Image (cartoon, coloured by chain):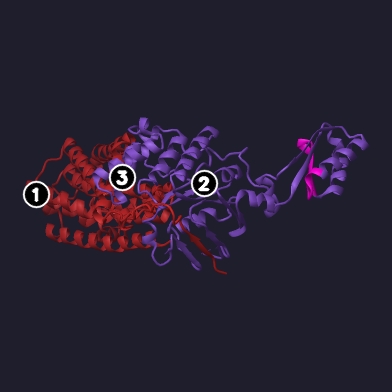
Amino acid sequence: MKRYGKTQALAGLDLVASPGRVVALLGPNGAGKTTFVRAVATLLRPDAGTLYVDGIDALRKPAKVRQVIGLAGQFAAVEEAMTGRENLEMVGRLFGLGRKQAKAAAARVLDQMQLTADADRLVRTYSGGMRRRIDLGISLTGTPRLLLLDEPTAGLDPGSRLQLWDAIRSLVAAGTDILLTTQYLDEADRLASDIVIIDHGQVIAAGTPEELKTRAGDDLIEVHVRDADHLPAVSGVLAKLGHDPHVDAPQHRAYVAVDDGSSGLMDALRVLDARGIAVEDISLRRPTLDEVFLALTGKPAQTTDTPAQPAGT
Amino acid sequence: MTSTADIAPSPGMPRAGLNIGAGLWPSSIAVAGRTVRKFVRTPQLIVFTTIQSAVFLLMFRYAFGGAIGTRSHLSYVEFLVPGFIATNILWAGMGAATGVADDVEHGFVDRLRSLPMPRAAVLIGRSLADLALMVWALAIAAILGFVVGFRLGGSVAEALAALGLCVVFGFALEWVFIAAGLVAGNAQAAQSIGLLITPLVFISSAYVPVQSMPAGLRQFGEIQPLTPMANAVRGLVTGPGGKAVLEHSTGYYVGLSLVWAAGIFVVFGFLAAVRFTRR
């Protein structure tokens, strides 16, 4: 727990991350994700509670924790007036590598991040996506056991996000453990084996993406209509079949959670047809993480449709 | 109301090696190297600081100089240039405040603090880099001084001693700006804090004799650290003519400057360390 004046951050956050997996900390702005990562990275000392990183007591032996972690932040903290290679070599030296070893580590990371061709250009001239990759690479020069990624793709364009995801996936494949924070549901869904949803500094749900989707509810029957005026009627029909009906007027759709999907689907079709409501599309589907989030926190998550300002200029 | 968290990597995979981290000296050098490179590769910084110095010197030498009496037989250029060189360390050092604040604001300090290196190296590296930049600024200031007509009155050894004193005093002063940068936390605030110090330059014997100031200002001017600095440099580089202007011996001013430097270093070094380690 960390106190900021009268504000308590992460009061009552209990979290045990299983080893060998990619854990995504998912939550809206201000949920405490960054605070948590900063505590794990020993940049901030919790005022109360316990924190073990790789079995090391982070409160008593922060210097030992720093020997096993790598941190890449949401600000690409890279020296712009140095080349990508120089940045990597500098941090390699700071990790305690000799001159030759640092050079070798830089070359390895550049290759890993597919930046070899741009290695000797000043970072100033890099694109936003390249900056994030060099930032990620910097945290890898010391071959950390645990990699902390604080909103690694915030503000990136879709193409660069995909590239960064690939880079992160190849790290996972190579056996690096990762704790990442994100406010993008699809990012957590695609990268993480475990998702921990936090809000107001508290864990509100944890599990694999599949478990979370199951927990948020049953399958959904979703009906699209051509004429939005029919939505109240559709909603009325759906309400009788399941629970928690929702109407999404701008999208001309209504959906409801049902216990038994297939028979519910048949019933819905039959009743709607009997009432003469023209249905454009009807489907049975699993809830999305967006809906999970909404169900668990009572407010919608930020989606990737409205990315933050591109970072870096 | 406690929180617990346990983050552990997989026991099954081959463990990555422990990163023991660099020692204090190599990491300080690595951090310093970065700051120096940043400066050298940002031509605007170099050009701007040089022009700023030059404009300052030219204004006092030619625009105001004619109206300023030195209350002695020293010419104004002989009086001015030593003061200009002594106070140049303040202008040169001011960049550290914005630099440090910028690093705090944009996560560079966090990156360094997350590495297995001595955290003190972040600040020591900074101060070493700024020291190097200050030597460069002093060289420029000295060259400008000769260009506007200053001629050395003392020995070369004395001139080198003057530059050495500037470097020592400048190093101490760096810590004022490093502390300011850490407290400010963003570059614009840091710049404002830095500018608060500028009156010190004017209420000193750097550009005009403090004897010409009204009571109050004059007493302040006499006790504040830049006056002994300006006088020490003056005594060392203007020879017998300059020494005659001074109320005390050159040695007195050199000693007083060193005492000030030690005091400033201890107080602001401590403040910077406290601010830096608080988390």
Instruction: Please tell me the colour of chain A.
Output: purple
Q: Position of residue B170 (x, y in %)?
A: 24, 52
Asked whether, in this view, residue B42 is left or right of residue A214, the answer is left
Query: Does the stretch in magenta take in B52?
Result: no
Q: In this view, does A309 lie above or below B112?
A: above
Instruction: Please tell me the colour of chain B.
Output: red
Q: Give the range drawn in magenta.
A: A244-262
Are there few (<14), some (14-19), or many (20+) residues within 10 Å of tag 2?
Answer: many
Q: Name the residue under label 2.
A: A151
Q: Where is residue A89 in the image (x, y as percent from the top left)?
A: 30, 43
The residue under the point 10% across, 43% down is B152
Q: In this view, does A312 lie above or below B268?
A: above
Q: Give the foreground label among 2 and 1.
A: 2
Can you tell which mark lies on residue A263? none
* Residue A20 visible in rendering: yes
The residue under the point 12% across, 40% down is B151
Are there few (<14), some (14-19), or many (20+) residues within 10 Å of tag 1?
Answer: some
What residue type is disc 1 on?
Answer: Gly
Mark-to-mark CA distance, 1 and 3 = 47 Å
Q: Mark 1 points at which residue?
A: B239
What residue type is disc 3 on?
Answer: Met
Q: Mark 3 points at which residue?
A: A90
**Which chain does tag 3 point to?**
A
